[in-house]
Image (cartoon, helix red, strand yellow):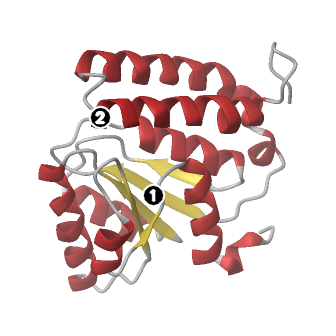
Amino acid sequence: MKSGTGLPAARIVEELMIPAILRVGELYEQKTYFLPQLIASAEAMKKGLDHLEPLLGAAKSRGTSKGVVILATVQGDIHDIGKNIVALMLRNYGYDVIDLGKDVATKTVIEHMKKHKPAVVGLSALMTTTMTVMQNVMMLARQEGLTTPFILGGAVVTQAYAASLGASYARDGVEAVRVIETLCPNKNMEN
């Protein structure tokens, strides 16, 4: 569906908004931008996504689902703009997303995994001090006998870190969709 600009809403998100917020992240890492600019950019992005979300609901309105994906920003981390973008993209591509929010306790993630039996669990962290919580979540899940694949992301998370934990990695929402499509190929058909 098209937005007021004449461009399809998905193109606005994928070609304009996501590159813009990624650039803000780069400027923050380079210490050109600081926390106030990061927060202001995240708030602007959220308002834009909130406005465009109704226009992106085509896949959901068709009554199909490619599977359930649980997303959470790990405990101790209050930054969730990246996770919110991933959630929006996944919904647009036909996934049922259970977004647990930010600062989510490890136990809460495990409880929702048991309750909803997702195809994939996505964990996000922006700070180096909180990315270790990802390992705690994955270890507890395995101890509980849950074999659901995990995908990790966030400003401080790298491909190498995710691989060291036995998880997949995505640097942004577009890549997250691609990775999740490969993690649950059986779910790519209509229910």
* Kind of element beneath mark 1: strand
Whether residue 110 is situated above or below residue 58 in the rendered picture: below
126 or 158, which lies in front?
A: 158
Residue behind mark 2: 30
* Kind of element beneath mark 2: loop
Residue 70 numbered tag: 1
Distance between the alpha carbons at the discs numbered 1 and 2: 31 Å
The residue sitting at 28% across, 66% down in the picture is 110
Numbered disc in front, either 1 or 2 = 2
Where residue 34 appears, as percent x and y from the top left, is 25, 22
Where residue 120 appears, as percent x and y from the top left, is 49, 69
The residue sitting at 74% across, 46% down in the picture is 60
Q: For the residue carrying disc 1, how many other residues have a C-alpha within 10 Å: few (<14), some (14-19), or many (20+)? A: many
The residue sitting at 24% across, 22% down in the picture is 35
Where residue 29 appears, as percent x and y from the top left, is 29, 37
Image quarter hosting the C terminus:
bottom right
Image quarter hosting the N terminus:
top right
Whether residue 123 is situated above or below residue 38 in the rendered picture: below
Q: Earlier in the sequence, mark 1 or mark 2?
A: 2
Q: Amino acid at mark 1?
A: Ile
Give the left or right position of residue 3, taking residue 114 as reference.
right
Whether residue 73 is situated above or below residue 167 in the rendered picture: above
Taking the view exactly as shown, the residue that stands out farthest to the left is 129
Residue 110 numbered tag: none
Where residue 75 appears, as percent x and y from the top left, is 19, 49
Q: For the residue carrying disc 2, how many other residues have a C-alpha within 10 Å: few (<14), some (14-19), or many (20+)? A: few
> Quick check: can you spot residue 118?
no
The residue sitting at 63% across, 75% down in the picture is 182
Give the left or right position of residue 162, taking residue 181 as reference.
left
Q: Quadrant of residue 76?
A: top left
Q: Amino acid at mark 2?
A: Gln
State if disc 2 and disc 1 touch (CB < 8 Å). Answer: no
